[in-house]
Amino acid sequence: MAIAVGQEAPDFTLVNEDNEKVTLSELRGTPVVLVFYPFAFSGICTDELCSVRDDYSSWEEKGAKVFSISRDSRFVQKVFKEKEGLTQTMLADTKGETAEKYGVWNAAAAAAERATFVIDRDGKIVYAIHNEIPNARDHSEVEQHIS
């Protein structure tokens, strides 16, 4: 079961595409959007992350830090980001531990399900979308929850 709106966002430390550590708790005071996705370079994932790049740049304009998270290595994340011209930071959750903390790890597929969480400046989940792997998300309501 995915973590619910109103709960404190579970802390994590992951490496980004440039092998820099990112710790969620160090971002307190800043809104954060986490976009979990199953696999880099797959059809729906590519469409969704390119949509975040093309249609939702306003998230960052409102001050949010945006992170896309999958089980792919930082090396794959870096190539995926460069190939698709993605602007969000890519985080490598290679063992699925962070996806598991958020209740979106699909053990049978060995991948995160499609989930997006908006975390407020105080570290609370204020909005969540959670879809099974084959079902794309609609991110149109995310922005109104970033403050």
Image: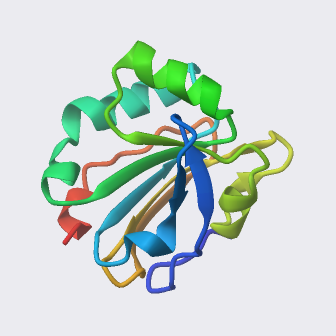
Residue closest to the eye, 30 or 57 = 30
Q: Position of residue 68 (x, y in %)?
A: 48, 44
Relative to 97, is 7 on the left or the right? left
With respect to residue 26, does 21 lie above or below?
Answer: above
From what the image shows, is residue 2 above or below residue 19? Answer: below
As drawn, the residue found furthest toward the top would be: 83
Answer with left or right where residue 27 lies relative to residue 90: left
Q: Nearer the viewer, residue 48 or 93?
A: 93
Identity of the residue drawn at 58% across and 73% down: 11
Can see residue 44? no
The residue at the point 23 percent across, 29 percent down is 54
- In the image, what residue occupies the spot 32% across and 56% down? 65
Residue 124 image offset from top left, x and y in percent: 42, 82
Q: In which quarter of the image is the N terminus?
A: bottom right
Q: What is the residue that sits farthest to the right in this orientation?
A: 108
The quarter of the rendered structure image containing the C terminus is: bottom left
- Residue 89: x and y in percent read 42, 42
Res 122 seen here: yes
Residue 77: give x, y in percent of width and height: 56, 29
Its colouring scheme is rainbow
How many numbered marks, from 0 up?
A: 0
Nearer the observer, 128 or 70 = 70
The correct choice, above or below, for 3 with respect to 61 in the image is: below
Q: In this view, does 142 lie above or below 138?
A: below
- Residue drawn where x is 31% and y is 31% of the image: 51
